[in-house]
Amino acid sequence: MTTSPTGSAAHILVVEDDAVINAALSDRLRAEGFDVSTAMDGPAAVAAFHEHEPDLVVLDIMLPGFDGLEVCRRIQAERPVPVLMVTARDDETDILVGLGIGADDYLTKPFRMREVVARVRALLRRVERAAELARMSRSARTAGGVSLDPDTHIVTVDGESVHLTPTEFDLLDALISRPGVVRRREELLAEVWGWNDDLGSRTLDSHIKTVRAKVGSRRIRTVHGVGYAFEPAEADGAQS
């Protein structure tokens, strides 16, 4: 997908403080048919987001001014938008914080340009699918003390409201739709992210951690080498 919901070329905001990487990303995305704007620090990224209203943001974590995590917080508070985080460090804490505040996917440097393009296209397709589903009325799901309403995106855990990002919501929705059934990793990657291979496996694992932190770790069971299952009989506590 290279078009926005209005039918024009999808607009990508590239936020990267390394001028060479910024130019390389921007040039490749333009060559793929996207409109592109750029920023090289935190304040400029937020200003560019307001000015250009992009369909997707490619966002480096390490930025001058204020970092990419703060950029993500500010733009998601304004308007939900898919975010592909880019980081030079394989720092799990930064990654989990980023995913927990609204990033949808991440890549660590060095990366291949074709992988960036593939993930951008997958995230835009996901937005398209979400818009289609939003036009359909779907029943709320309840299992094991967790209630999830696809129409309102309201989630409660043991009666308490819990905030989930759009990706976390879709992942929990996929798991809770078949309580007790092990969902294979490739199934979840295809259903939630639109991936048809295992390139996003680390993103899936990281999102599982953020969902567990919000709904209770023992409610989501890991089946090593296979996938994950929502366990309605499990209460909060240590992961089994």
Image (cartoon, rainbow, N blue to C red):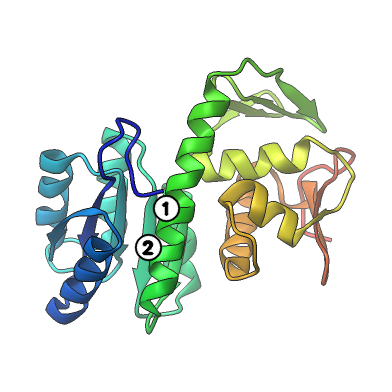
Direction from residue 212 to residue 120 in the image, left or right: left
Let me know if residue 163 appears in the view: no
Q: Disc 2 marks which residue?
A: 85
Disc marking residue 103:
1
Residue type highlighted by circle 1 = Ala
Pinpoint residue 131: horizontal percent, then vertical percent.
48, 29
Is disc 1 in contact with disc 2, using a CB cutoff of under 8 Å? yes
Disc marking residue 210:
none
Judge the density around disc 1: few (<14), some (14-19), many (≥20) Cα neighbours within 10 Å: many
Residue type highlighted by circle 2 = Met
Q: Residue at x 62, y 51 (%)?
A: 213
Q: Is residue 37 above or below residue 41?
A: above
Name the residue nearer the viewer: 92 or 8: 8
Q: Residue at x 12, y 77 (%)?
A: 19
The part of the image, by quadrant, that contains residue 225 is bottom right
How far is the residue under mark 1 from the one under mark 2? Answer: 7 Å
Direction from residue 34 to residue 99 in the image, left or right: right
Q: Residue at x 16, y 81 (%)?
A: 20
Q: Is residue 178 above or below residue 213?
A: above
Secondary element type, mark 2: strand
Pinpoint residue 126: horizontal percent, then vertical percent.
51, 44
Pinpoint residue 127: horizontal percent, then vertical percent.
46, 39
Q: Residue at x 58, y 19 (%)?
A: 151
Secondary element type, mark 1: loop
Q: Is residue 195 above or below residue 6?
A: below
Pinpoint residue 13: horizontal percent, then vertical percent.
22, 54
Name the residue nearer the viewer: 51 or 128: 128
Direction from residue 66 to residue 110 in the image, left or right: right
Q: Earlier in the sequence, mark 1 or mark 2?
A: 2
Of all residues shown, which one is farthest toward the bottom? 110
